[in-house]
Amino acid sequence: MIRQKLDDAAVAARLAELQGWTLVKDGSAIEKHFVFNDFRQAFGFMTQCALAAEKIDHHPEWSNVYRKVHVQLTTHSAHGLTELDFQLAVLMDMAGRDAA
C-alpha cells in the first residue's frame, strides 16, 4: 500500500469522522486516550489492535498503565498522517467500544 502523506484538508476531513481523536500539536499524528474498567480489558483491547495492525501492516505508538491505553498514530515513512493512520483509528475505535 502506498503511504502518501495527506494534506491538511484531508486530515481535517478524516479527523472529523472520528470521535475522541485529536491532532497532536505539530500536526504529524493523531492521538486518543482509552480508559477501560481494568487491566484485563485494556490488555484485550491492545491484543485485538495488535492483530488488526498486523493485517494492515501499520503499527501504533502506544503505552499502557493499568486500565489506560494512550495511542498515537503517524506514518514515519511519510513524515505525517496517511490513510493508514485513519484506518487503524477506526479499527481501534471498534475494538475499544467497551471502554469505560
Image (cartoon, rainbow, N blue to C red):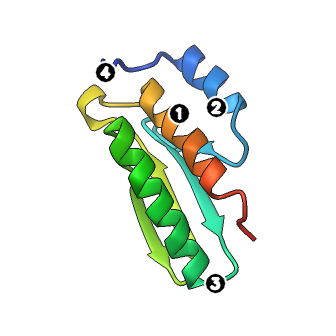
Q: Which mark is residue 86?
A: 1
Mark 4 or mark 1: whose residue is earlier in sequence:
4
Q: Quadrant of the C terminus?
A: bottom right
Where disc 3 sits, the SS reads loop
* Residue at image point 37% right, 36% down: 56
Measure the alpha-carbon separation of dots 2 and 4.
Answer: 21 Å
Q: For the residues labelled 2 and 3, say whether their Cβ atoms are less than 8 Å apart.
A: no
Q: Is residue 27 visible?
A: no
Q: Quadrant of residue 90?
A: top right
* Residue at image point 70% right, 49% down: 20
Residue holding disc 4: 1
Q: Which mark is residue 15?
A: 2
Q: Amino acid at mark 1?
A: Phe
Left or right: 42 as drawn, with respect to 29: right
Measure the alpha-carbon separation of dots 4 and 3.
Answer: 36 Å
Q: Which mark is residue 38?
A: 3
Q: Which mark is residue 2?
A: none
Q: Amino acid at mark 4?
A: Met
Q: Amino acid at mark 3?
A: Asp
Left or right: 15 as drawn, with respect to 72: right
Left or right: 21 as drawn, with respect to 19: left
The mark lying in front, picked from 2 and 4, is 4
Measure the alpha-carbon separation of dots 4 and 1.
Answer: 14 Å
The mark lying in front, picked from 3 and 1, is 3
Q: Amino acid at mark 2?
A: Leu
Where disc 1 sits, the SS reads helix
The mark lying in front, picked from 1 and 2, is 1
